[in-house]
Amino acid sequence: MTIHPARRTGGDMEIVTARLKLRSAREDDLQAMHAVLSDARATRWWSTPAHDSLEQTQDWLNGMIANGPDNPDFVIEQDGRVIGKAGFWRLPEVGYILHPDHWGRGLAGEAVAAAIDHVFATRDLDDLTADVDPDNAASIRLLERLGWARTGFAERTWHVGGEWKDSLYYGLSRAVWSARLQT
């Protein structure tokens, strides 16, 4: 596996993979991120229902921007077009979402792997975490393919759109990630 070193471009953090660019969020990402966050298919297992308005997405985007360029939470670009986000919205917990038009191509896994590389290269953390809806089989497969291990389960952890959701918890250690890179 290739390590993806981050670089600064104009104050923004940027990571380039074989097919993607992960970079700091900007104001001009509003329309593209709204296309992702207002799609009920994309937000089916997200921590909020699909966004009803641009203002709701603007608030979400403002929060991402306010965390600053050193925060390891990135928008994902493919061929110059924003298609989602991946990274660590709050260390050590990973989060990712991709527009459904881009599902099934390994792009989310590529983006998450690059974000993991970046965090382990730049932060003094030994363990990362993830919280996944037990019904989100694609996300579970993505995490397990990247070496994450299930660490727990809890019922009724998220109340989203009037419905209670359960959580599967996953963990990834620096040692497991490093060993994976050696193979």
Image (tube, helix red, strand yellow):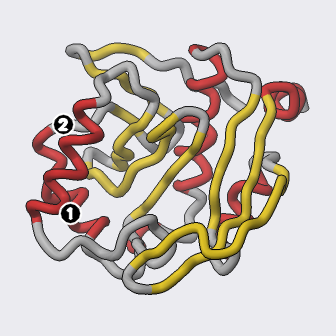
**Looking at the image, residue 84 lies above or below residue 65:** below
- Judged left or right of residue 63, residue 123 is right
Q: Residues within 10 Å of mark 1 (few under 14, many from 20)?
A: many
Q: Secondary structure at mark 1?
A: helix
Disc 2 to disc 1, C-alpha distance: 13 Å
Q: Quadrant of residue 157?
A: bottom right
Res. 48 image quadrant: bottom left
Q: Is residue 108 above or below residue 112?
A: below
Q: Is residue 72 above or below residue 131?
A: above
Q: Left of 9 or right of it: where is 107?
A: right
Q: At which x and y percent is residue 18?
A: 53, 39
Q: Quadrant of the N terminus?
A: top right
Tell me which residue sits at (30%, 75%) in the image.
Answer: 50
Image location of residue 158, percent across then percent down: 52, 69
Q: Secondary structure at mark 2?
A: loop
Image quarter (top left, top right, bottom left or bottom right) of the C terminus: top right
How many marks are shown on the rendered structure?
A: 2
Q: Is 85 situated above or below 89?
A: below
Q: Residue at x 36, y 49 (%)?
A: 78
The amino acid at mark 2 is: Arg
Q: Residues within 10 Å of mark 2 (few under 14, many from 20)?
A: some
| CB under 8 Å between discs 2 and 1 | no
Circle nearer the N terminus (2, 1): 2
Q: Which residue does the numbered mark 2 point to in the structure image?
A: 26
Q: Amino acid at mark 1?
A: His
Residue tagged by mark 1?
A: 34
- Nearest the viewer among 123 and 162 is 162
Q: Quadrant of residue 80?
A: top left
Q: Nearer the viewer, residue 164 or 27?
A: 164
For image coordinates 55% across by 35% down, the residue present is: 115
Q: Position of residue 28 (x, y in %)?
A: 11, 44
